[in-house]
Amino acid sequence: MADSEKSFLIRQWDEYKGFWAERFSFLDNYSRFVKRDKPLPSWSSDDVQEFIASDPHHGPTLKTAREAASFGLTGSLLGAVSTAAFAWKYSKSPHGAGLSFIAGGAFGWTFGHEVANHWYQLYRMDTMAAQVKFLEWWEKKSEGHS
């Protein structure tokens, strides 16, 4: 069907989908690992350490990215507890404290990752490539091709 034959809404929807598909094209890197008939088996910390030791280029990047994740977890915990405590202190509202806990956790996680990004200078590394290489390595290893 030619573009001129499509309705206005269909054309707008197609443009909208194309716009967001272009913005989130980086997700295509992971699609072959996520959209599998048989999912990849779970891996352990020992498996990740084995990859880090075996890949001199992507291993250190993956190790740094894993260390940076602890900043996000710490930020999430601090943000959740502090905002919930603040909300409870001034409102004594359980639902307000609960919502503050959730929002504080999300904001703290974001802030923690931003701190880690600068602390470890992750903006200089290609962490996505390291994660994809690990998934490729794990796919081969779990299927017995290593």
Image (cartoon, rainbow, N blue to C red):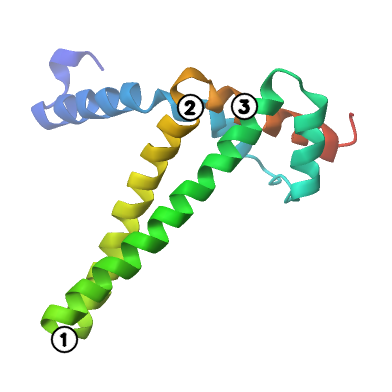
- Earlier in the chain: of badge 2 and badge 3, it is 3
Relative to the observer, which residue lies in front, 3 or 38?
Answer: 38
Q: In the picture shown, does residue 127 fall above or below 41?
A: above
- The vertical placement of 77 against 5, above or below, is below
Kindly report the distance in space between the C-alpha atoms of the residues bearing marks 2 and 3.
8 Å
Compared to residue 17, the image places residue 96 above or below, namely: below
Residue 61 is labelled as 3
Element on which disc 3 rests: helix
Percent x, y of residue 137: 76, 30
Residue beneath disc 2: 122
Residue type marked 3: Thr
The residue at the point 9 percent across, 27 percent down is 8
**Quick one: SS at disc 2?**
helix
Residue 14 point in image, percent of width and height:
24, 26
Marks 2 and 1, how far apart in space?
Answer: 40 Å
Of the residues under marks 2 and 1, which one precedes in the sequence?
Answer: 1
Looking at this view, name the residue that lies furthest to the left: 8
Nearer to me, 22 or 57: 57
The tally of labels here is 3
Give the residue at mark 1.
92
Mark 2 is surrounded, within 10 Å at the Cα level, by few (under 14), some (14 to 19) or many (20 or more) other residues, namely some
The residue under the point 18% across, 74% down is 87
Say what secondary structure mark 1 lies in: loop
Task: Choose top left, top right, bottom left or bottom right for residue 9.
Answer: top left
